[in-house]
Image (cartoon, rainbow, N blue to C red):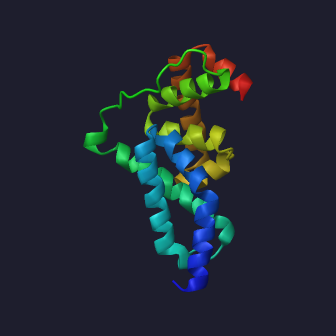
């Protein structure tokens, strides 16, 4: 890469690193793994920087790479065991923090593909078509995975899912 490409990549990285890291955390539920996934996505982007012709496609490209990495990792045998580290309960925690903590803990229990759809649709704000493009699947798959994912969350959170929806 020439100097202009390096500067453009560095600028993009500075602007998007926190968002990509947060999305990775929501997808995998662990900050250390989120850092690894975000780094992998940016390394892949750097490697393919010159091939991506449309600068408006960068976010989608990184998102797709990130989601695929998280889902692929979840299929590995050593990752099938669920992490038991939960966010600690703290007395007097602000209601927004408690709500976010409950949601992230519940998302950890949802299968990876459904979790990816829920994160992209409701936390990243993508529509059905954008989510389908990010995941490389049909819009019908996104709709069914959304339905199944929300049902799983409902089973975990019960009535508090409706409270989360109203708060968000």
Identify the image quadrant of the C terminus: top right
Residue 11, compared with residue 131, is above or below; it is: below
Residue at image position (56%, 41%) is 117
Q: How many labels, in total?
A: 0
Residue reaching furthest bottom?
2
- Front in this rendered view, residue 140 or 57: 57
Residue located at (60% from left, 44% from top): 120
Left/right of residue 44 with respect to residue 164 in the rendered view: left
- Residue 63, compared with residue 119, is above or below; it is below
Quarter where residue 43 is shown? bottom left
Which percent across, then down, holds residue 133?
Answer: 59, 55
Return the residue nearer the eye: 138 or 70: 70
* In this view, 162 is above or below 122: above
Please give the name of the residue rendered at 60% of the width and 28% of the height, measured from the top-left corner.
Answer: 100
Q: Find residue 162 and report its image quarter.
A: top right
The residue positioned 72% from the left and 24% from the top of the image is 167
Nearer to us in this view, 86 or 123: 86
From the viewer's perspective, is 121 left or right of 111?
Answer: right
Q: What is the x, y in percent for residue 80?
A: 31, 36
Q: Quadrant of residue 59?
A: bottom right
Q: Is residue 134 left or right of residue 36?
A: right
Out of 16 and 155, give the one closest to the viewer.
16
Residue 158 coordinates in the image, percent (x, y): 57, 14
């Amino acid at each position: 890469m020439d100097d202009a490409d390096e500067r453009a990549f560095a600028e993009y990285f500075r602007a998007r690193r926190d968002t990509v890291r947060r999305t990775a955390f929501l997808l995998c539920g662990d900050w250390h793994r989120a850092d690894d996934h975000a780094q992998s996505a940016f390394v892949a982007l750097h490697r393919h920087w010159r091939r991506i012709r449309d600068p408006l496609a960068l976010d989608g490209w990184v998102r797709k790479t990130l989601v695929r990495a998280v889902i692929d990792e979840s299929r590995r045998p050593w990752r099938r065991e669920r992490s038991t580290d939960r966010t600690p309960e703290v007395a007097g925690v602000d209601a927004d923090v408690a709500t976010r903590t409950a949601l992230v803990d519940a998302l950890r229990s949802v299968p990876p593909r459904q979790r990816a759809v829920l994160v992209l649709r409701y936390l990243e704000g993508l529509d059905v078509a954008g989510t389908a493009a990010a995941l490389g699947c049909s819009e019908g798959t996104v709709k069914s995975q959304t339905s199944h994912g929300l049902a799983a969350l409902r089973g975990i959170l019960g009535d508090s899912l409706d409270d989360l929806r109203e708060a968000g």
